[in-house]
Amino acid sequence: MRGHSRRLAALLAAVILLLPLAGCASVFDKEYFASSDYEYVRPTAGSDGAITVTSYTTLRLAISALITQHEESGTLDLSAYSGEDISDDLAAACNSVSRQTALGSYSVDYISYDVNTIVGYTEAQIYIYYKRSQEEIDSIISVATSAGLYSSIADAVESMSPGLVVLVSATDVDQDEAESYVTEAYMSNPLACVVKPTATVDVYSGLGMQRIYDVRIDYPSGDRELEEMHGDLNEAAARLAARVTSEGDAYRALQAASLLVEECSSRENGGGHTAYDALVVGEADCEGMALAYKALCDTLGIGCQVVEGRFDRTEHYWNIVTLDGSSYHVDTSRAAEFGLANTFLRSDAEMWGGYWWDIAEYPECSGPLSYASLTEQTSAEPSEEPAAEETPADETAEPAAEG
Protein backbone atom coordinates (compact mmCIF):
# COMPACT_ATOMS: atom_id res chain seq x y z
CA MET A 1 0.00 0.00 0.00
CA ARG A 2 2.83 2.40 0.77
CA GLY A 3 4.34 1.81 -2.68
CA HIS A 4 0.95 2.61 -4.16
CA SER A 5 0.78 5.80 -2.08
CA ARG A 6 4.24 6.90 -3.19
CA ARG A 7 3.30 6.39 -6.87
CA LEU A 8 0.24 8.59 -6.47
CA ALA A 9 2.24 11.27 -4.70
CA ALA A 10 4.87 11.26 -7.43
CA LEU A 11 2.18 11.82 -10.03
CA LEU A 12 0.84 14.99 -8.44
CA ALA A 13 3.38 17.31 -10.05
CA ALA A 14 2.65 15.93 -13.51
CA VAL A 15 -1.10 16.03 -12.98
CA ILE A 16 -0.91 19.77 -12.22
CA LEU A 17 -0.48 20.33 -15.94
CA LEU A 18 -3.77 18.59 -16.59
CA LEU A 19 -5.90 20.79 -14.37
CA PRO A 20 -7.03 24.23 -15.58
CA LEU A 21 -7.55 26.64 -12.70
CA ALA A 22 -10.37 29.17 -13.07
CA GLY A 23 -9.44 32.84 -13.35
CA CYS A 24 -5.90 32.22 -14.66
CA ALA A 25 -6.27 32.96 -18.39
CA SER A 26 -3.50 35.20 -19.72
CA VAL A 27 -3.38 37.71 -22.57
CA PHE A 28 -1.44 35.10 -24.54
CA ASP A 29 -4.48 32.79 -24.46
CA LYS A 30 -2.50 29.96 -22.88
CA GLU A 31 -3.02 27.99 -19.70
CA TYR A 32 -0.98 28.92 -16.64
CA PHE A 33 -1.09 27.03 -13.38
CA ALA A 34 -0.26 27.98 -9.83
CA SER A 35 1.21 25.13 -7.82
CA SER A 36 3.62 24.30 -5.07
CA ASP A 37 5.64 21.19 -4.35
CA TYR A 38 3.58 18.46 -2.83
CA GLU A 39 5.03 17.34 0.47
CA TYR A 40 4.48 13.68 1.02
CA VAL A 41 3.34 12.86 4.55
CA ARG A 42 3.84 9.29 5.67
CA PRO A 43 0.45 7.86 6.62
CA THR A 44 -0.17 7.06 10.25
CA ALA A 45 -0.98 3.54 11.40
CA GLY A 46 -4.68 4.26 11.09
CA SER A 47 -4.40 5.67 7.53
CA ASP A 48 -1.82 3.38 5.92
CA GLY A 49 -1.82 3.88 2.15
CA ALA A 50 -3.76 7.14 2.19
CA ILE A 51 -2.72 10.33 0.37
CA THR A 52 -2.63 13.37 2.61
CA VAL A 53 -4.81 16.21 1.26
CA THR A 54 -4.66 19.68 2.81
CA SER A 55 -6.54 21.94 0.35
CA TYR A 56 -9.06 21.90 -2.47
CA THR A 57 -6.26 22.12 -5.06
CA THR A 58 -4.43 19.08 -3.68
CA LEU A 59 -7.77 17.29 -3.42
CA ARG A 60 -8.30 17.68 -7.16
CA LEU A 61 -4.70 16.69 -7.84
CA ALA A 62 -5.05 13.52 -5.78
CA ILE A 63 -8.21 12.45 -7.61
CA SER A 64 -6.56 13.23 -10.95
CA ALA A 65 -3.56 11.13 -9.96
CA LEU A 66 -5.87 8.18 -9.39
CA ILE A 67 -7.38 8.65 -12.86
CA THR A 68 -3.99 8.99 -14.52
CA GLN A 69 -3.01 5.62 -13.05
CA HIS A 70 -6.42 4.17 -13.93
CA GLU A 71 -6.97 3.23 -10.28
CA GLU A 72 -10.47 2.12 -9.44
CA SER A 73 -10.24 3.31 -5.83
CA GLY A 74 -8.02 5.26 -3.48
CA THR A 75 -7.90 6.57 0.05
CA LEU A 76 -7.40 10.25 0.93
CA ASP A 77 -6.29 11.45 4.37
CA LEU A 78 -8.31 14.63 5.08
CA SER A 79 -7.31 15.11 8.72
CA ALA A 80 -5.39 18.32 7.94
CA TYR A 81 -7.83 19.59 5.32
CA SER A 82 -8.28 23.37 5.47
CA GLY A 83 -11.65 23.65 3.72
CA GLU A 84 -14.88 24.39 5.53
CA ASP A 85 -17.11 21.63 4.12
CA ILE A 86 -15.36 18.39 3.13
CA SER A 87 -18.46 16.79 1.61
CA ASP A 88 -19.23 19.77 -0.63
CA ASP A 89 -15.60 20.04 -1.70
CA LEU A 90 -15.41 16.34 -2.48
CA ALA A 91 -18.52 16.54 -4.64
CA ALA A 92 -17.18 19.60 -6.45
CA ALA A 93 -13.71 18.08 -6.96
CA CYS A 94 -15.06 14.79 -8.30
CA ASN A 95 -17.31 16.65 -10.73
CA SER A 96 -14.52 19.04 -11.74
CA VAL A 97 -11.98 16.31 -12.48
CA SER A 98 -14.42 13.99 -14.28
CA ARG A 99 -16.29 16.63 -16.29
CA GLN A 100 -14.07 19.71 -16.53
CA THR A 101 -10.77 18.16 -17.60
CA ALA A 102 -10.07 16.57 -20.98
CA LEU A 103 -8.75 13.30 -19.54
CA GLY A 104 -11.66 13.00 -17.12
CA SER A 105 -14.25 13.70 -19.82
CA TYR A 106 -12.65 11.11 -22.08
CA SER A 107 -11.99 8.30 -19.62
CA VAL A 108 -14.31 8.56 -16.60
CA ASP A 109 -17.93 7.48 -16.39
CA TYR A 110 -18.52 8.71 -12.82
CA ILE A 111 -16.87 9.00 -9.40
CA SER A 112 -18.33 8.25 -6.00
CA TYR A 113 -16.92 8.53 -2.47
CA ASP A 114 -17.46 7.70 1.19
CA VAL A 115 -16.30 9.89 4.08
CA ASN A 116 -15.34 8.29 7.39
CA THR A 117 -14.62 10.35 10.50
CA ILE A 118 -13.05 8.95 13.63
CA VAL A 119 -11.90 11.07 16.56
CA GLY A 120 -9.05 13.22 15.24
CA TYR A 121 -8.96 11.55 11.80
CA THR A 122 -11.00 11.90 8.59
CA GLU A 123 -10.53 9.95 5.40
CA ALA A 124 -12.37 9.62 2.10
CA GLN A 125 -12.58 6.48 -0.02
CA ILE A 126 -12.77 7.38 -3.73
CA TYR A 127 -14.33 4.99 -6.27
CA ILE A 128 -13.79 5.62 -9.99
CA TYR A 129 -15.81 3.97 -12.76
CA TYR A 130 -14.26 4.13 -16.22
CA LYS A 131 -15.58 4.09 -19.77
CA ARG A 132 -12.08 3.51 -21.19
CA SER A 133 -9.62 0.69 -20.57
CA GLN A 134 -6.08 1.08 -19.27
CA GLU A 135 -4.81 0.17 -22.75
CA GLU A 136 -6.85 2.98 -24.30
CA ILE A 137 -5.47 5.49 -21.80
CA ASP A 138 -1.89 4.31 -22.39
CA SER A 139 -2.29 4.70 -26.17
CA ILE A 140 -3.09 8.44 -25.98
CA ILE A 141 -0.57 10.55 -27.91
CA SER A 142 0.37 13.77 -26.10
CA VAL A 143 1.33 16.88 -28.10
CA ALA A 144 1.66 20.56 -27.28
CA THR A 145 -0.29 22.39 -30.00
CA SER A 146 -2.55 21.94 -33.02
CA ALA A 147 0.55 21.50 -35.21
CA GLY A 148 1.30 18.34 -33.27
CA LEU A 149 -2.30 17.20 -33.73
CA TYR A 150 -2.00 17.58 -37.50
CA SER A 151 1.35 15.75 -37.57
CA SER A 152 -0.10 12.87 -35.56
CA ILE A 153 -3.11 12.59 -37.88
CA ALA A 154 -0.86 12.81 -40.95
CA ASP A 155 1.26 9.94 -39.60
CA ALA A 156 -1.88 7.86 -39.07
CA VAL A 157 -3.13 8.55 -42.61
CA GLU A 158 0.29 7.74 -44.07
CA SER A 159 0.27 4.35 -42.36
CA MET A 160 -3.42 3.87 -43.19
CA SER A 161 -4.20 3.47 -39.49
CA PRO A 162 -7.86 3.13 -38.42
CA GLY A 163 -7.55 5.88 -35.84
CA LEU A 164 -5.78 7.49 -32.92
CA VAL A 165 -6.40 9.49 -29.75
CA VAL A 166 -4.44 12.70 -29.22
CA LEU A 167 -4.22 14.93 -26.14
CA VAL A 168 -3.31 18.53 -27.06
CA SER A 169 -2.12 20.80 -24.26
CA ALA A 170 -3.35 24.08 -25.77
CA THR A 171 -5.60 24.33 -28.82
CA ASP A 172 -8.95 25.65 -30.03
CA VAL A 173 -9.29 23.27 -33.00
CA ASP A 174 -12.91 22.12 -33.24
CA GLN A 175 -14.36 18.85 -34.53
CA ASP A 176 -14.80 19.99 -38.14
CA GLU A 177 -11.26 21.31 -38.41
CA ALA A 178 -9.81 18.14 -36.90
CA GLU A 179 -11.75 16.07 -39.43
CA SER A 180 -10.44 18.27 -42.25
CA TYR A 181 -6.89 17.41 -41.15
CA VAL A 182 -7.46 13.87 -42.44
CA THR A 183 -8.34 15.11 -45.94
CA GLU A 184 -5.49 17.61 -45.88
CA ALA A 185 -3.02 14.88 -44.94
CA TYR A 186 -4.31 12.67 -47.77
CA MET A 187 -3.97 15.48 -50.30
CA SER A 188 -0.46 16.25 -49.08
CA ASN A 189 0.82 12.70 -49.58
CA PRO A 190 -1.13 10.85 -52.30
CA LEU A 191 1.52 8.12 -52.60
CA ALA A 192 1.02 7.07 -48.97
CA CYS A 193 -2.74 6.69 -48.67
CA VAL A 194 -4.16 5.28 -51.90
CA VAL A 195 -7.82 6.12 -51.38
CA LYS A 196 -9.46 9.14 -49.82
CA PRO A 197 -10.40 8.36 -46.21
CA THR A 198 -13.23 9.82 -44.17
CA ALA A 199 -12.98 10.74 -40.51
CA THR A 200 -15.16 11.00 -37.44
CA VAL A 201 -13.76 12.99 -34.52
CA ASP A 202 -15.04 13.29 -30.95
CA VAL A 203 -13.58 16.14 -28.90
CA TYR A 204 -13.28 16.00 -25.11
CA SER A 205 -12.44 19.19 -23.24
CA GLY A 206 -12.69 20.94 -19.91
CA LEU A 207 -12.50 24.52 -18.68
CA GLY A 208 -9.07 25.20 -20.18
CA MET A 209 -7.61 24.90 -23.67
CA GLN A 210 -6.64 21.25 -23.31
CA ARG A 211 -8.43 18.87 -25.67
CA ILE A 212 -8.52 15.14 -26.37
CA TYR A 213 -9.35 14.16 -29.97
CA ASP A 214 -10.66 10.66 -30.61
CA VAL A 215 -10.06 10.31 -34.36
CA ARG A 216 -11.56 7.35 -36.25
CA ILE A 217 -10.47 6.98 -39.88
CA ASP A 218 -12.41 4.92 -42.41
CA TYR A 219 -11.06 3.68 -45.75
CA PRO A 220 -13.32 2.48 -48.58
CA SER A 221 -11.17 -0.65 -49.15
CA GLY A 222 -9.86 -3.48 -46.98
CA ASP A 223 -6.33 -3.68 -45.60
CA ARG A 224 -5.04 -6.27 -48.09
CA GLU A 225 -6.52 -4.46 -51.07
CA LEU A 226 -5.09 -1.15 -49.86
CA GLU A 227 -1.62 -2.67 -49.55
CA GLU A 228 -1.79 -4.06 -53.10
CA MET A 229 -3.04 -0.75 -54.48
CA HIS A 230 -0.34 1.11 -52.56
CA GLY A 231 2.36 -1.03 -54.16
CA ASP A 232 0.88 -0.66 -57.66
CA LEU A 233 0.56 3.12 -57.29
CA ASN A 234 4.12 3.63 -56.11
CA GLU A 235 5.49 1.40 -58.88
CA ALA A 236 3.50 3.31 -61.52
CA ALA A 237 4.68 6.67 -60.18
CA ALA A 238 8.30 5.50 -60.10
CA ARG A 239 8.10 4.19 -63.68
CA LEU A 240 6.66 7.41 -65.03
CA ALA A 241 9.07 9.56 -63.01
CA ALA A 242 11.99 7.53 -64.40
CA ARG A 243 11.02 8.72 -67.88
CA VAL A 244 11.60 12.32 -66.80
CA THR A 245 15.18 12.88 -68.02
CA SER A 246 15.26 16.66 -68.43
CA GLU A 247 17.68 18.72 -66.34
CA GLY A 248 16.47 21.47 -64.03
CA ASP A 249 13.28 21.42 -61.96
CA ALA A 250 11.31 23.63 -64.34
CA TYR A 251 11.96 21.36 -67.32
CA ARG A 252 11.37 18.27 -65.21
CA ALA A 253 8.06 19.67 -63.99
CA LEU A 254 7.08 20.35 -67.62
CA GLN A 255 8.06 16.89 -68.80
CA ALA A 256 6.21 15.26 -65.89
CA ALA A 257 3.05 17.21 -66.78
CA SER A 258 3.39 16.24 -70.45
CA LEU A 259 3.86 12.55 -69.63
CA LEU A 260 0.86 12.55 -67.28
CA VAL A 261 -1.35 14.10 -69.97
CA GLU A 262 -0.14 11.46 -72.43
CA GLU A 263 -0.66 8.51 -70.09
CA CYS A 264 -3.94 9.48 -68.43
CA SER A 265 -7.27 10.32 -70.01
CA SER A 266 -8.87 13.27 -68.21
CA ARG A 267 -12.60 12.74 -67.66
CA GLU A 268 -14.65 14.97 -65.40
CA ASN A 269 -17.64 12.63 -65.62
CA GLY A 270 -16.90 9.03 -64.81
CA GLY A 271 -13.19 9.42 -64.10
CA GLY A 272 -11.68 8.24 -60.84
CA HIS A 273 -10.80 10.64 -58.03
CA THR A 274 -7.39 9.30 -56.97
CA ALA A 275 -3.77 9.24 -58.08
CA TYR A 276 -4.24 5.46 -58.41
CA ASP A 277 -6.97 6.02 -61.00
CA ALA A 278 -4.74 8.38 -62.97
CA LEU A 279 -1.45 6.46 -62.85
CA VAL A 280 -2.61 2.83 -62.69
CA VAL A 281 -6.08 2.78 -64.27
CA GLY A 282 -5.21 5.58 -66.70
CA GLU A 283 -8.44 7.56 -66.36
CA ALA A 284 -9.24 10.24 -63.78
CA ASP A 285 -11.07 13.48 -63.13
CA CYS A 286 -9.41 16.76 -62.15
CA GLU A 287 -8.92 15.62 -58.55
CA GLY A 288 -7.23 12.39 -59.62
CA MET A 289 -5.04 14.25 -62.14
CA ALA A 290 -3.98 16.83 -59.55
CA LEU A 291 -3.14 14.11 -57.02
CA ALA A 292 -1.19 12.19 -59.66
CA TYR A 293 0.84 15.25 -60.63
CA LYS A 294 1.54 15.90 -56.95
CA ALA A 295 2.70 12.28 -56.61
CA LEU A 296 5.04 12.63 -59.60
CA CYS A 297 6.49 15.89 -58.31
CA ASP A 298 7.03 14.33 -54.89
CA THR A 299 8.90 11.47 -56.53
CA LEU A 300 11.03 13.96 -58.48
CA GLY A 301 11.69 16.19 -55.48
CA ILE A 302 9.76 19.14 -56.89
CA GLY A 303 7.68 21.29 -54.51
CA CYS A 304 4.01 20.83 -55.34
CA GLN A 305 0.61 21.01 -53.67
CA VAL A 306 -2.97 20.29 -54.63
CA VAL A 307 -5.32 23.28 -54.89
CA GLU A 308 -9.01 22.86 -54.12
CA GLY A 309 -11.06 25.61 -55.74
CA ARG A 310 -13.45 26.28 -58.59
CA PHE A 311 -13.29 26.55 -62.34
CA ASP A 312 -16.21 28.03 -64.21
CA ARG A 313 -18.27 27.89 -60.98
CA THR A 314 -17.79 24.15 -60.45
CA GLU A 315 -15.52 22.35 -57.99
CA HIS A 316 -12.09 21.91 -59.50
CA TYR A 317 -8.63 20.69 -58.49
CA TRP A 318 -5.24 21.67 -59.88
CA ASN A 319 -1.69 22.19 -58.61
CA ILE A 320 0.75 24.86 -57.52
CA VAL A 321 4.43 24.09 -58.11
CA THR A 322 7.31 25.97 -56.52
CA LEU A 323 10.46 26.43 -58.61
CA ASP A 324 13.48 28.43 -57.46
CA GLY A 325 11.42 30.09 -54.74
CA SER A 326 8.54 31.18 -57.03
CA SER A 327 5.15 29.50 -57.34
CA TYR A 328 3.01 28.79 -60.41
CA HIS A 329 -0.34 27.19 -61.25
CA VAL A 330 -0.49 23.95 -63.26
CA ASP A 331 -3.75 22.37 -64.45
CA THR A 332 -3.00 19.01 -66.07
CA SER A 333 -6.68 17.99 -66.30
CA ARG A 334 -7.39 20.80 -68.78
CA ALA A 335 -4.15 20.44 -70.74
CA ALA A 336 -5.56 17.83 -73.13
CA GLU A 337 -8.21 20.31 -74.27
CA PHE A 338 -6.38 23.62 -74.02
CA GLY A 339 -2.74 22.56 -74.27
CA LEU A 340 0.09 22.93 -71.76
CA ALA A 341 0.83 26.36 -73.26
CA ASN A 342 -2.36 27.58 -71.59
CA THR A 343 -2.32 25.47 -68.40
CA PHE A 344 1.33 25.20 -67.27
CA LEU A 345 3.22 27.74 -65.11
CA ARG A 346 0.35 30.21 -64.96
CA SER A 347 0.34 33.27 -62.70
CA ASP A 348 -2.46 34.40 -60.40
CA ALA A 349 -3.31 37.18 -62.85
CA GLU A 350 -3.65 34.70 -65.70
CA MET A 351 -5.90 32.42 -63.63
CA TRP A 352 -8.32 35.03 -62.28
CA GLY A 353 -11.62 35.16 -64.07
CA GLY A 354 -12.12 31.48 -64.84
CA TYR A 355 -10.66 30.10 -61.61
CA TRP A 356 -11.39 30.79 -57.95
CA TRP A 357 -9.38 29.69 -54.89
CA ASP A 358 -8.77 30.85 -51.33
CA ILE A 359 -5.73 33.07 -51.76
CA ALA A 360 -5.07 32.98 -48.01
CA GLU A 361 -4.51 29.22 -48.14
CA TYR A 362 -2.04 29.09 -51.03
CA PRO A 363 1.18 30.91 -52.03
CA GLU A 364 1.16 33.85 -54.43
CA CYS A 365 1.93 32.79 -58.00
CA SER A 366 3.80 35.52 -59.86
CA GLY A 367 7.16 34.03 -60.86
CA PRO A 368 9.12 34.92 -64.01
CA LEU A 369 8.91 31.53 -65.73
CA SER A 370 6.35 30.50 -68.33
CA TYR A 371 5.68 27.68 -70.75
CA ALA A 372 6.83 29.88 -73.62
CA SER A 373 10.12 30.78 -71.94
CA LEU A 374 10.90 27.12 -71.25
CA THR A 375 10.09 25.89 -74.75
CA GLU A 376 12.00 28.75 -76.41
CA GLN A 377 15.08 27.91 -74.33
CA THR A 378 14.66 24.24 -75.15
CA SER A 379 14.55 24.99 -78.88
CA ALA A 380 17.53 27.36 -78.70
CA GLU A 381 19.74 25.04 -76.64
CA PRO A 382 18.91 21.45 -77.58
CA SER A 383 22.37 20.16 -76.66
CA GLU A 384 21.83 21.21 -73.00
CA GLU A 385 18.45 19.51 -72.80
CA PRO A 386 18.85 15.87 -73.92
CA ALA A 387 15.18 15.17 -73.17
CA ALA A 388 13.80 18.01 -75.28
CA GLU A 389 12.56 15.57 -77.92
CA GLU A 390 10.70 13.62 -75.22
CA THR A 391 8.88 16.76 -74.09
CA PRO A 392 6.04 17.08 -76.60
CA ALA A 393 6.08 20.87 -76.63
CA ASP A 394 5.11 21.00 -80.31
CA GLU A 395 2.26 18.53 -79.83
CA THR A 396 0.70 20.17 -76.79
CA ALA A 397 1.11 23.82 -77.67
CA GLU A 398 -2.11 25.27 -79.04
CA PRO A 399 -2.69 28.47 -81.03
CA ALA A 400 -3.02 31.53 -78.83
CA ALA A 401 -6.61 31.98 -79.90
CA GLU A 402 -7.60 28.89 -77.96
CA GLY A 403 -6.52 30.41 -74.63
Image: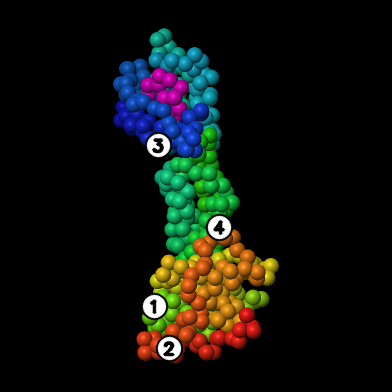
Tag shown at residue 69? 3
By secondary structure, the bulk of the magenta-drawn segment is best described as helix
Of mark 2 and mark 1, the one earlier in the sequence is 1
Cα distance in 3D space between marks 4 and 3: 44 Å
Q: Are marks 4 and 3 in contact (CB under 8 Å)?
A: no
Dot 1 falls on a residue whose secondary structure is loop
Q: Is residue 222 visible?
A: no
Q: Viewer-proximal residue, 65 or 246? A: 246
| Residue 52: percent from left, percent from top | 37, 21
* Residue at the (48%, 33%) spot, across then down: 26
Q: Amino acid at mark 4?
A: Ala
Display coloring = rainbow
Cα distance in 3D space between marks 1 and 3: 57 Å
Q: Amino acid at mark 2?
A: Ala
The magenta span reads: 51-63
Of badges 2 and 1, the one in the foreground is: 2
Cα distance in 3D space between marks 3 and 2: 72 Å
Q: Which residue is mark 4?
A: 360
Cα distance in 3D space between marks 2 and 1: 16 Å
